[in-house]
Image (cartoon, rainbow, N blue to C red):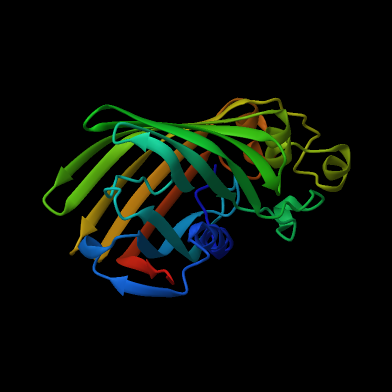
Amino acid sequence: MPLKPCAVRSLSFAACAAALLPTAAPAQEVVAVDKAKDWVVTITGNGAWGSSYWGAKSKDWTGFPSIALRQADQPAEFEAPDDGFSFALFGNPGLKVGVVGRYMAGRYNSEDDLQGTASIPWGLNVGGFVEYWPMPMIRTRFDVLHGVKGNYGWSSNIEADYVQPWNKFTFSLGPRLVLGDDTTTDTYFGVNERAAFVNPKLTAYDPSGGITSVGALAAVNYEFDDNWSTAGYVRYDRLVGSAADSPIVKNIGSPNQVVVGMSVSYTFGLDLHRAN
């Protein structure tokens, strides 16, 4: 899936995070991270350069904010840049289970090459994830998602990362596998008869579900102190199967999908003072 998030997904997660805070708290106090008793909040500014849409040859830039929330008694843990917005419901340092949301970039027929195709609005997929550390430096992660906006099919992401801390740096590298059912694959790679008639570069195509792409992600994070950190990453995906055979990819796009991104984050503690 294209790693091209935007402000919309960040704002949605911020709203969810706000809903998790106890509603009876009339006052909040920002405190040092190591003194927080309730929550630790991380606000991030992100920038990314990558494919304009899933399967595109063209590239563009995007900037977006994001927010992460964890309970103060939970230690800070490794998170890959492409994990989506997730919140662990239960688990331990080696295994956790929770909910996750992922943003999907839209595709708009205002581009000449997409003449005749239906525009696809930005999408939101939600579901659950399982994360397991079989070894101290190996993280595996699996999620299952269903589209609630933009597309309404099922998809899944399988990830593994080798994680190596060194001084204030954390390096990570690992493979990625994306799967989609018939509905998801048809949404992004199918071509109907009308589009094929209008656009001479396309032919009618009815794809089937399965493995959509295989790839890898490399990332590095640097912590200046308890509050400030920065990160950079590169992700490469190779479209395969029905996705790669789509005329949208073969005739006007590319099976090679690359995203380069960076971010700056600020972390702080947030304590809630409840009325007696």
In front of the other: 85 or 244: 85
From this view, report whether residue 194 is shown above or below residue 28: above
Please name whichever residue, 190 or 130, is drawn nearer the observer in this view of the structure: 130
Check the image and name the residue furthest to the left. Answer: 167
Q: Residue at point 17% right, 44% down?
A: 165
Point 66% across, 54% down: residue: 122
**x%, y% of residue 97?**
44, 35
Report the side of 261 relative to 19 (left or right). left
What residue is shown at x 42% (from left), y 70% (from top)?
Answer: 276
Numbered-mark total? 0
Between 200 and 51, the one lying in front of the other is 51
Res. 133 visible in picture: yes
**Image location of residue 32, percent across then percent down:** 23, 68
Q: Is residue 110 above or below residue 244?
A: below
Instruction: Name the side, left or right, on which 169 lies relative to 26.
Output: left
Vertically, is 66 above or below 220? below
Q: Position of residue 96 (x, y in %)?
A: 39, 35
Residue, x 36% and y 60% (percent of image)? 39
Q: For the N terminus, which image quadrant? A: top right
Q: Position of residue 256 (x, y in %)?
A: 50, 40
Residue 84 in view of the camera: no
